[in-house]
Image (tube, grey):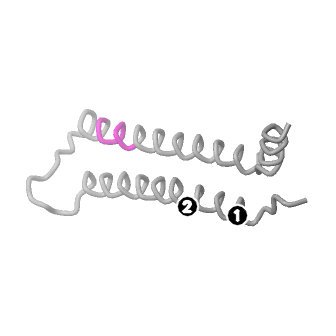
Amino acid sequence: MGCSECCLKCLSGIPYASLIATILLYAGVALFCGCGHEALSGTVTILQTYFDVVRSPVDALDVFTMIDIFKYVIYGVAAAFFVIKPLRCLRSMSEISFVR
């Protein structure tokens, strides 16, 4: 019974609410990135198809460059959330006392 008691003691100390929040956060960030990327790509398609806006050959700040910048901002925000949340979860788990 020593091993099962130890396992139950460790499993009772896991912050399940934080784990569920982490999964929901990852799903939300993935949805945000996917929808943002698709919307910006659709905007490029609409501009090229219906408004005959062409990407300038010179490295100038045009609509397409701004859309690319927005895409990279979205990816940066997603990367920050994917790094910060596990660190916060680990910090909260380290504060839990397993001794009762």
Amino acid type of the residue tagged 2 in the rendering: Ile
Boundaries of the magenta span: 40-45
User: Is residue 15 located in the magenta-colored stretch of the structure?
Assistant: no
Provide the secondary structure element on which disc 1 rests: helix
Q: Residue 76 at x, y = what percent?
A: 42, 58
Of 91 and 38, the residue lying toward us: 91
- Residue 45 is marked as none
**Which residue is the extreme one toward the front?**
2
Name which residue lies at 78% across and 62% down. Answer: 96
Provide the secondary structure element on which disc 2 rests: helix
Name which residue lies at 80% across and 51% down. Answer: 13
Splitting the image into 4 quarters, where does residue 39 fall?
top left
Q: Main secondary structure of the magenta part?
A: helix
Name which residue lies at 32% across and 52% down. Answer: 67
Name which residue lies at 41% across and 37% down. Answer: 38
Q: How many marks?
A: 2
Of 82 and 60, the residue lying toward us: 82
Amino acid type of the residue tagged 1 in the rendering: Ser
Quadrant including the C terminus: bottom right
* Mark 2 closeness class: few <14, some 14–19, many ≥20 residues within 10 Å: few
Q: Is residue 94 left or right of residue 43?
A: right
Q: Is residue 1 left or right of residue 50?
A: right
**Which residue is the extreme one toward the left?**
57
Give the Cα distance between marks 2 and 1.
15 Å
* Mark 1 closeness class: few <14, some 14–19, many ≥20 residues within 10 Å: few
User: Is residue 41 located in the magenta-colored stretch of the structure?
Assistant: yes
Task: Tell me: residue 35, above or below residue 58.
Answer: above
Q: Label 2 belongs to which residue?
A: 84
Q: Residue 36 at x, y = what percent?
A: 45, 44
Between label 2 and label 1, give the one nearer the viewer: 1
Q: Label 1 belongs to which residue?
A: 94
